[in-house]
Image (cartoon, rainbow, N blue to C red):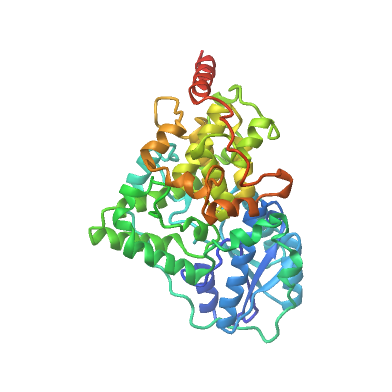
Amino acid sequence: MTDKTPILLWFRRDLRLGDHPALTQACASGRPVIPVWIHDEVVETHGAAPKFRLGLSVDALAADLADKGSRLILRRGKALDVLRELVKETGAGAVWWTRLYDPESKARDTGVKSALKAERIDARSFGGHLLFEPWEVETGTGGYYKVYSPMWRAVRDRDVGAALPAPGKIPAPDAWPGSDDRADWRMAADMQRGAEIVAAHAVVGERSASSRLGAFIAHRIDTYKAERDFPAIPATSGLSENLTYGEISPRSIWHAGWRALHEDKAGAEHFLKELVWREFAYHLVHHTPHITTANWRTEWDGFPWKTNPEAPEVQAWKQGRTGVPFVDAAMRQMYVTGTMHNRARMIVASYLTKHLMTDWRVGLEWFAECLTDWDPASNAMGWQWTAGSGPDAAPYFRVFNPVSQLDKFDPDHAYPHAWIAEGQSRPPKTATDYFAAIPKSWGLSATDPYPKPVVAIDEGRKRALEAYESRRA
């Protein structure tokens, strides 16, 4: 007898309709599909900016589902409890979802799957968040990759299946369960007055993500490799924001990149490499989950990093008031837009962990609070790579010089001009918006004098190198 019980389709970080394997299979089953999103125990741990931006994405998905004659059922509570309640309310015989790989999500999902299966519910997970499942990419000896370049060579020519079209119709149940009102959750509350500033820079939803990819491929991918490190030039795709929430699939981006490569677009291969860098981050998170909370290289456990997140020099770093223009401009860009240029992320991370000798976890947690494109795997690997405690094939201790880096990648200093108001008679709106976005308790004003450096660049570098040599000894 054909099963006609509904399928609960549990959306998480796959907030799209196109190239969604779980949704496609659910629609093809002929059974009613009930889309669900839960403000659960994992979402509760999210920082202010990620939670705020996630709410916007949920709204966009709800609108897209409504256009298909479907609905997004919203509930709040522990995931397993909510799903059990919905199974009871709807008579659903299945709960399907897209796999996630960070330790917190895996722990939640493992518990949910085990409990539901024990109750004879078809609990099933699907791919879609990555190009390749982490356990399907192996070295020649059967292990996992610890260095990026060999992994890139291993997957470069692998077959990536075609992206799936959005379903034409999503079968609806005879009766819909009740839904919470997302406004009641106040997901933007922790952003305080910064929400309005950051919202103006967000590019939200599946349609916007697709348009963003199309514009990048059409106009910027050709110069991507040559210009991507220049923070004042809009040379990158900006798709990290949309990938974070699954508003676009990595497979869709991959195929667009390959088409550009076959059209001899100069930056296409480097763009594809950056997509695989994200895969590498999740590869490591799957195989070595301690990378999100502890030194990936255990020999760094004795490095004399300071750990006080309230230290005056750390507060200066957080506020974008270090007296180092590249660092300060980057931090202010984050408060205004919710994102930060990738080269700038390396600079601010190096400055915190090397010049200020502060534990990378202090920075990791602050980024997790402030970035709208926060990704648990990329954030962890990025901080550890820059700090020196993570995966890196370089045989040297890397200390970025934020002064020479600015001169190299922004010789006109257009980047700090765009984001630092102090000292300018007519600062641009991007710079003054910083003061409208930050907490009032910081007590900062555009008329304040620009601060002197917290630490001299040469002095900070020397101190970091001495600590590194002492650790080696």
Q: Position of residue 220 (x, y in %)?
A: 34, 59
Residue at the extreme front: 425
Q: Is residue 467 above or below residue 361?
A: above
Quadrant, the N terminus: bottom right
In the displayed structure image, the side of residue 433 where residue 180 appears, left or right: right
Q: Nearer the viewer, residue 450 or 95?
A: 450
Q: Position of residue 194 (x, y in %)?
A: 65, 56
Residue drawn where x is 37% and y is 49% of the image: 228
Q: Position of residue 231 (x, y in %)?
A: 43, 47
Residue at the extreme top: 473
Q: Nearer the viewer, residue 141 or 160?
A: 160
In the displayed structure image, the side of residue 189 where residue 347 appears, left or right: left
Q: Nearer the viewer, residue 371 or 194?
A: 194
Residue drawn where x is 69% and y is 31% of the image: 311
Say if residue 360 shows up in the picture.
Answer: yes
In the displayed structure image, the side of residue 362 where residue 212 appears, left or right: left
Count of labels shown?
A: 0
Q: Position of residue 10 (x, y in %)?
A: 63, 67
Say if residue 161 shows up in the picture.
Answer: no
Residue drawn where x is 62% and y is 83% of the image: 172
Residue at the extreme bottom: 174
Which image quadrant for residue 11? Answer: bottom right
Q: Is residue 5 above or below residue 445?
A: below
Q: Is residue 85 above or below residue 272?
A: below
In the displayed structure image, the side of residue 194 where residue 159 appears, left or right: left
